Image: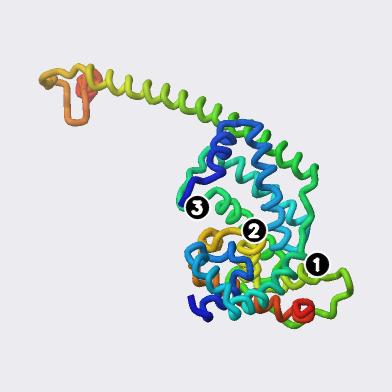
Amino acid sequence: MDAGRFAALADAYGSALHRWPPAEQAAAMLFAETERGRAILARAGRLDAMLDRHRVEAASPGLHRAIVARAATEVSQKRRRRFWWLGFGLAGVGVAGAVAGLALVTVVSPDIQADHYVMDANTTSFGDAGPDADQAEEDL
Amino acid sequence: MGADPDEELVRRIGAGDPAAVQAMVARKLPRILALAARMLGDAAEAEDVAQETFVRIWRHASSWRRGHARFDTWIHRVALNLCYDRLRRRREWTTDELPEVADDAPLPDAMPGDEERRVGQALQRLAPRQREAIVLVYYQELSNIEAAGAMQVSVDALESLLARGRRALQAMLAGDCDE
């Protein structure tokens, strides 16, 4: 590793080598023993020391409790949703079975159709001209 | 990629194990809260983000499958998205106009014992993507590959964001760093 790469890594990751890319840590440790390496790390370390002063408040017990309580609500809602989906699923299976049964009955036992249709003497192309038609002719 | 240390805990949460829920909160809440606090600079908003992040964990635990990212990286991404939602709501910027350059003018001289607050101010003045990179790698101690994955950028882009962010912090905290 040359000084340029070592300085670039220190600029990016700071002075603690455990934050550096794992693949480059071994070479970096060797360079860190040099005078140039020590100077680069010392410069990066001054900013690290500043950054280390920044602390954030620990989580309050109330926040911890609220998050755990929400987990219980989410789990019970999920179970309820699962129950409803199971119900819908069973109902769907029932409906699908009924439709399939109806379709099967229709296919297996179709309507009985006459092999041929006997044309009646009273039948016209407008339908059956039965007794009313005869009466109308007599009235003329 | 090695074994995911959270995988078993996630599986138990998915199976509805209350002890696993407690363990997950104890393990991840400090990390998520710290991430959100440093991204937002507001303790109350950070608590809200932590709660919302856990709601997503509870909802997705049973269906979560390890893909390319570890569970810890995934929850960092979830928390970061929630942080960005809040930052956008503050109207500091719009989605397409994320500032890339930090305001790195030196902060006023520090009073004794004031350094922590000054570092917090300097972090908030960084460009958000630079702040995100520094928070993930420096404070959350994600590896470069995990941080780049959480930020959905290349490792080279991550290193560039880190270097620019640290330079900006150095300029803002110039007097303090020389001490």
**Amino acid, disc 2:** Gln
Q: Residue at x 69, y 60 (%)?
A: B86
**Amino acid, disc 3:** Ala
Do badges 2 and 1 share one subunit?
yes
Q: Which mark is residue B69?
A: 3
Quadrant in which residue B12 is drawn:
top right
Quadrant in which residue B164 is drawn:
bottom right
> Separation of disc 2 and disc 1 at Cα?
18 Å
Which of label 1 and label 3 is nearer to you? 1
**Amino acid, disc 1:** Glu
Left or right of B34: which side holds B76?
left
Asked if labels 3 and 1 touch by Cβ distance under 8 angstroms, the answer is no
Q: Does B63 appear above or below B43?
A: above
Residue that label 2 marks: B140
Q: Does B17 appear above or below B36?
A: above
> Separation of disc 1 and disc 3 at Cα?
33 Å
Depth check: give the residue in front, B82 or B71.
Answer: B71
Q: Quadrant where the C terminus of chain B lies?
A: bottom right
